Image: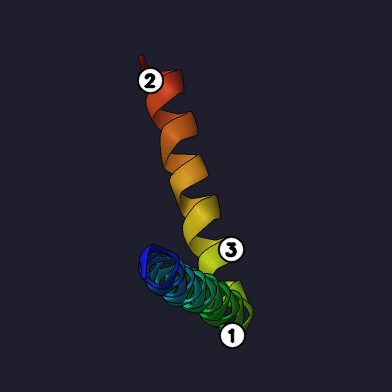
Amino acid sequence: MKNLITKKEEIIERTKGCIEEEKGASDLIAVVVIIVILLVVAIVFKDQLIGIVNSLGDKVSNWISSN
């Protein structure tokens, strides 16, 4: 009887482990999807982003020069 309880506990622990592994895998997939979306947005708005960065650089350079 004791051996049966030990097996039951082992099965429960393995099931919990599988569930946690699946959750970790889905979190990884979510991160990859977010990175892909950010890359696509960066590619689509590349010219606008370059303009913003250049504008900020000019403003910082002017601010540094004036101080």
The residue that mark 2 highlights is 66
Residue type at mark 3: give it: Ile
Q: Earlier in the sequence, mark 2 or mark 1?
A: 1
Q: Residue at x 49, y 70 (%)?
A: 14
Q: Label 2 to label 3, Cα distance in Å?
A: 24 Å
Give the colouring mode of the picture.
rainbow
Residue type at mark 1: give it: Val
The answer to which quarter of the image holds residue 5 is bottom left
Instruction: Determine the residue located farthest toward the top in the rendered image.
Output: 67
Residue type at mark 2: give it: Ser
The residue that mark 1 highlights is 44
Quadrant in which the C terminus appears: top left
Q: Residue at x 44, y 47 (%)?
A: 56
Marking on residue 50: 3
Task: Give the foreground label among 2 and 1.
Answer: 1
Task: Give the foreground label among 2 and 3.
Answer: 3
**Secondary structure type for disc 1:** helix
Q: Residue at x 38, y 67 (%)?
A: 9
Front residue of 10/18: it is 10
**Secondary structure type for disc 2:** helix
